[in-house]
Amino acid sequence: MKDENCIFCRIANGEIPSRTIYEDERFRVFLDLSPAAKGHALIVPKEHYANLYELPEDLAADVMRLAKRQAAVMTEKLSCDGFQLVQNNGKCAGQTVFHFHMHLIPRYRSDGQNIAWEPGSPSDAELDGVKAQILS
Ligand code: AMP
Ligand code: ZN
């Protein structure tokens, strides 16, 4: 399942060149062109799934296995001080390319980045309500 209008389908399947750092039958990992930090890369399945909701469970498990392996390799090679996994689904969650991808972001003490959120301060009742809503 490929989408000719999807840039990540075209990169993943080699139609558009990329700075690939890993490839197998199902995935390509390549450098992000607008990196948050040195070495920022993306894990992209070769099949088109728009987001996490569409991604089959077995592929989701393999994405995490690959992320773990890449984190080890990239940490060793780049000597980063930490490592961040980011995965956005939906425009309001920051997704801009609608082909599932996992960001691999090496972090450095002095990288000056701030990939964070504003912490909320819900009451106990609100937290209890959210829990009840999810469990209902
Ligand atoms: P997201 O906002 O989670 O959808 O992330 C999309 C990411 O894809 C961004 O970090 C972009 O910099 C990156 N990106 C978009 N087009 C390309 C491209 N042609 N090659 C490499 N990275 C890209
Ligand atoms: Zn695609």
Image (cartoon, rainbow, N blue to C red):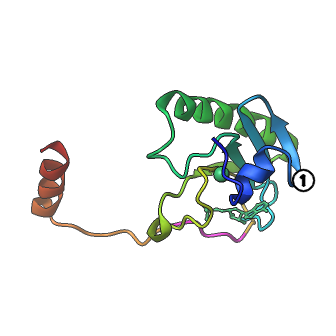
In the rendered view, does 14 fall on the left or right side of 124?
right
Residue placed under numbered mark 1 in the picture: 17
Taking depth in this image into account, of 88 and 127 the one nearest to the observer is: 88
Residue 107 appears in view: no
Residue type for callout 1? Pro
Secondary structure character of the magenta stretch overall? loop
Residue 6 at what x, y percent from top left? 68, 58
In the rendered view, does 68 fall on the left or right side of 93?
right
Q: Quadrant of residue 61?
A: top right
Q: Is residue 133 magenta?
A: no
Asked if the beta carbon under badge 1 is closer than 8 A to the nearest atom of ligand 1, the reply is: no
In the rendered view, does 84 fall on the left or right side of 14?
left
Residue 2 at what x, y percent from top left? 67, 45
Residue drawn at the location 77% of the way across and 46% of the way down:
12
Residue drawn at the location 52% of the way across and 27% of the way down:
58
Please give the count of numbered marks on the rendered protein: 1
Ligand 1 falls in which quarter?
Answer: bottom right
Q: Write down the region rendered in magenta.
A: 112-116
Q: Quadrant of the C terminus?
A: top left
Q: Quadrant of the N terminus?
A: top right
Residue 16 appears in view: yes
Q: Is residue 97 above or below residue 14?
A: below
Taking depth in this image into account, of 68 and 33 the one nearest to the observer is: 33
Residue drawn at the location 16% of the way across and 43% of the way down:
135
Residue 106 at what x, y percent from top left? 73, 52
Q: Is residue 5 above or below residue 12?
A: below
Q: Secondary structure at mark 1?
A: loop
